Image (cartoon, rainbow, N blue to C red):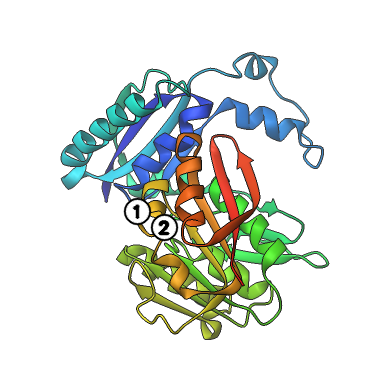
Amino acid sequence: MKFIELTIHTTTEGSELVADILWDYTNYGVTVCDVNDIIALQNDKRVFWDYMDDSIAAEAGGDVLVKGFLPVDIADESIKKIVADLDALRERSKDFISLGSLETGRREVDGDDWIDVWKKHFRPLHIGGRVVVCPEWIAYEAKENEVIIRLDSNMAFGTGEHETTAMCLELLQEYVKEGDVVIDVGCGSGILGIAAVKLGAKFAYLTDIDYVAVRSAEHNSERNGTSDKTKVALNDLLENADVRGRVMTANITADILCRLSESIPKNLEKGGILILSGIIEPKLEQVIAAYENVGLLLIKQLRRGEWFALAMKNKD
């Protein structure tokens, strides 16, 4: 199968925002090629390289390439929409973040070739004190107290690479207790619901409006041996308001979080914890206010790069 590889030139700060736009138009993979990631990896004391060219470090802070892969038959239409979304992103971000040129380039590639290259970008990710996210094609043995989540990462967003996913995983490790029911709104790959079960939850309900995400979450849950403790539904929210979770997660976008602020808490137990992410700084106070207005209290806030995650407690 042939694909169009669309390359967008941006900055380290803008790379995840650009990647998010590409994920809206493809289920076939997005990569971020950033020399700053290489520098960070080299500075990680758990990783040692025999040699790294000094010229690489000199390039830090330069152009970042975000690549997305689009089926040939819909590439032209998708690229027009992507460019429009990039223009809108530049306009709303111009006062607080540099996005670089946002210049685009395209070339036709063979599917088998880019999938092999894309997979090489992934490695086991250690998130928080216990969770290790590992692509299913990489062999990794759990150390004491570690929880391994194995993902088929080429099916839907949510590998742990993104700051918002990582922050949600950190907060789940803090707030999920043995025997909890957990609900994940906008589940993507299913990573948060799977993690919740492996951290001790007795059951996790997962929802998403994307059929590919639902299929991916079901596949990943089966792969992780949690399918008997998870249920995945093709919906934006749980249809049954009688189902209550002591912990809920919603890693989507700030605008949707605000729109659903009166709906999401209906499935949250009294005294329960709601974990929200997908929030950029200009929208932060708006999201907090929306959920405070329906009776939730902000108890913790995390920031990674341009992204925020919140833990809010439902009134007792």
Q: Which mark is residue 156?
A: 2
Q: Which mark is residue 219?
A: none
Q: Is residue 96 left or right of residue 69?
A: right
SS class, disc 2: loop
Expressed as whole percent of the image width and height from the top left, the position of residue 115 reads 42, 49
Q: What residue do we see at 34% from left, 53% from top?
A: 27
Q: Quadrant of residue 237?
A: bottom left
* Residue 282 in view of the camera: yes
Q: Amino acid at mark 2?
A: Ala
Q: Amino acid at mark 1?
A: Asn
Expressed as whole percent of the image width and height from the top left, the position of residue 121 reads 55, 43
| CB under 8 Å between discs 1 and 2 | yes
Q: Closer to the N terminus: mark 1 or mark 2? A: 1
Above or below residue 212? Residue 183 is below
Quadrant of the frame with the C terminus: bottom right
* Residue 138 in view of the camera: no
Expressed as whole percent of the image width and height from the top left, the position of residue 242 reads 44, 84
Expressed as whole percent of the image width and height from the top left, the position of residue 79 reads 23, 36
Q: Which mark is residue 27?
A: 1
62, 273: nearer the viewer? 273
Q: Quadrant of residue 286?
A: top left
Crowd around label 1: few <14 · some 14–19 · many ≥20 (10 Å): some
Gap in angstroms between the C-alphas marked 1 and 2: 6 Å
